[in-house]
Amino acid sequence: MLEELREYREEIEYSHLDISSKEIIEKYGILQGPAVIINDILVSQGKIPSVKSLKKKFQKVLEK
């Protein structure tokens, strides 16, 4: 995990998923990889987001 994102490690669960799996594609509606799913919410696909962007997405998800 990137050092800049360590502050979220207790609030965010992460794992690597096979986004070519039919089950994963259907569950999250992934059209293009790579994809980032935070707390079961698809927040990015088709690109690798910047750390700044990820931090914003983490905050937004945690506020829900």
Image (tube, helix red, strand yellow):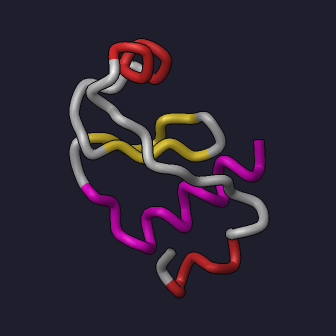
Q: Quadrant of the C terminus?
A: top right
Q: Is residue 53 left or right of residue 5?
A: left
The one of 60 and 45 positioned closer to us in this rendering: 45
Q: Is residue 57 magenta?
A: yes
Residue at x 27% of width, y 27% of height = 20
Q: Is residue 4 left or right of residue 47?
A: right
**Residue 61 x/y as whole percent:** 66, 47
Residue at x 55% of width, y 62% of height = 56
Q: Is residue 12 magenta?
A: no
How many labels, in total? 0
**Residue 7 x/y as whole percent:** 69, 78
From this view, report whether residue 39 is shown above or below residue 6. Answer: above
**Residue 39 x/y as whole percent:** 65, 42
From this view, report whether residue 23 is shown above or below residue 42. Answer: above
**Residue 1 x/y as whole percent:** 50, 75
The magenta-colored residue range is: 48-64
Residue at x 35% of width, y 43% of height = 35
Magenta span dominant secondary structure: helix
From this view, report whether residue 60 is shown above or below residue 45. Answer: below
